[in-house]
Amino acid sequence: MSQRSIDDFRAVLSGGGIRNSMYEVWVTFPDRTVQNTRLTTSRAMMLAKSAAIPASTLTQTPVNIIGGGTLKIAGTRTIDNWSATFISDNSMQLRDAFENWQYDIVNNESWQKEFEIRNYLRDIQVIQLERDGSHVRNYVLHGCFPLTVSEIALSYDDTESVQEFSVDFSVSHVSIEDETNMGAKSDMQFDTSKYR
């Protein structure tokens, strides 16, 4: 019979475990959406109140076999839409950037659409941090664009809350980098050639 003590558990969890509050979100904005992409990316990182490590689903395909049995084999892997909640600062520049991003894809005044996907697809990075701020794991969400920029409810009754809003993104696929091959995240260079 297996005997496990508190010392065994402490040895496995020697670092104290990963904390949900230790993360960074890096959103790369299209160049024409904002005047200063680096400043807006930094603003988004600082104001990202909540986010999530993206979910993925592997479907299964049943195959009927002789004798009435069923063999289940792997189907396709799909990536769910991803969302994050941002605090709204006094200038509302971050919300403006997300709204302009949508506007550049579909112009509601002329109903013109942007057909060059390299002009609006961008990558988002969700970085899990250790408590000392070091990078543990980096999820790169490829080919993203904002589907929904949520409403901000206004009320005379609420005088203490700071405004916040959520953005839902479409995600093409996800790759994972560990701390050994992450590189400098402050550069945030976006390779548009892969969407040509």
Image (tube, helix red, strand yellow):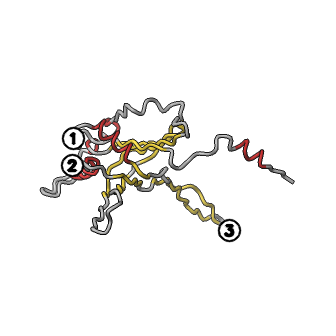
Q: Is residue 49 left or right of residue 158?
A: right
* Residue 171 picture location, percent across and down: 39, 50
Distance between mark 1 and mark 3 Cα atoms = 61 Å
Look at the image and tell me whether residue 44 can be seen: yes
Do callouts 1 and 3 mark residues in contact (Cβ within 8 Å)? no
Relative to 63, is 102 above or below? above
Between the C-alphas of marks 1 and 2, the distance is: 8 Å
127 or 64: nearer the viewer = 127
User: Badge 1 is on which residue?
Assistant: 32
- Which of pointers 1 and 3 indicates the residue nearer the eye? 1
Relative image position of residue 76 (x, y in whole percent): 49, 54
Residue where numbered disc 2 is placed: 104
What amino acid type should be assigned to the residue bearing mark 2?
A: Asp
Between residues 116 and 53, which one lies in front from this camera angle? 53
Local packing at callout 1 (Cα closer than 10 Å; few below 14, some 14-19, many 20+) is few
On the rendered structure, is 123 left or right of 6?
Answer: left
Please report whichever mark, 3 or 2, sits nearer to the chain's N-terminal start. Answer: 3
- Alpha carbon of mark 3 to alpha carbon of mark 2: how far? 57 Å
In this rendering, position of residue 40 left or right of residue 3: left
